[in-house]
Image (spheres, rainbow, N blue to C red):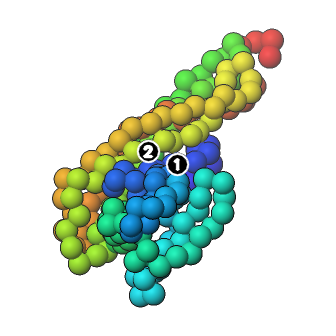
Amino acid sequence: MGFFVRVLGLLLTCSLCQLFASAEVREFSSKDGAKSLQAEIVDVDPARGTIRLKTVDGRIIDAPLSAFSADASEHAREFLDLQEVGRRLGLRFEEVTGNIKEEKIPSKGQAILTTPTGYLLTARNNGAAEMQDIELHYQVFYSEDQVTGGRVGRLAAGSLSIDSLQPREEQELFTSQVDIVRMKKLPASECDSGR
């Protein structure tokens, strides 16, 4: 990251259903429908045939998946599918900066340096099956210097889409650019008299 770039963070969420979204609380019913509870899936172990749930009051329950309804079993399969997608989708980020523009303000003894900055996002399908309809939402948090002194936080957001990503295929996408602004003191020889 360049000296003049003060990017505080880059957040990326991927909306492949709810891949990186917070867990979904839903109703889980017993196979006979006599009992139910509100919970979210924490883990599913297909080899052991068990499911781990976290109830709305924070209790952790480990139970055989066979004890739950067909709807709960389907939800467990979806959970496993989303975990698999999370393992298959690789993401790499690289900062991309443009040419620095300098605007001198001799009366203030400063120069404003503006650098257009964005990110190159490389998405890779590490799996053996095609991935479709991938939507990536991002937020870039950064700060910029103010002419009057101090800094102000900024946020830029956007989304990127990939229609299809074949196995072992990579696709490059670019986020929108933001202007990173930095103040620089001018040498006395470039300032207006009296400075």
Residue 49 sits in quarter: bottom left
Q: N-terminal of the two: label 1 or label 2?
A: 1
Helix, strand, or loop for circle 2?
A: strand
Residue at the image position 52 percent from the left and 54 percent from the top: 38
Decide: few, some or many residues near mark 2? Use Cα within 10 Å; few <14, some 14-19, many ≥20: some
Give how far apart the Cα atoms at labels 1 and 2 are.
7 Å
| 59 relative to 50, above or below | above
Residue at the image position 40 percent from the left and 61 percent from the top: 33
> Seen in the image, is 70 located left or right of residue 130?
right
Residue 133 image position (x, y, % from top left): 23, 53
Q: Nearer the viewer, residue 142 or 52?
A: 52
Quadrant location of the N terminus in the rendered image: bottom right
Helix, strand, or loop for circle 1?
A: strand
Q: Which residue is mark 2?
A: 138
Q: Which residue is mark 1?
A: 10
Contact flag, marks 1 and 2 (Cβ < 8 Å): yes
Residue 181 image position (x, y, % from top left): 58, 32
| 106 relative to 184, above or below | above
Quadrant location of the C terminus in the rendered image: top right
Residue at the image position 33 percent from the left and 62 percent from the top: 71
The amino acid marked with disc number 1 is: Leu
Q: Is residue 186 visible?
A: no
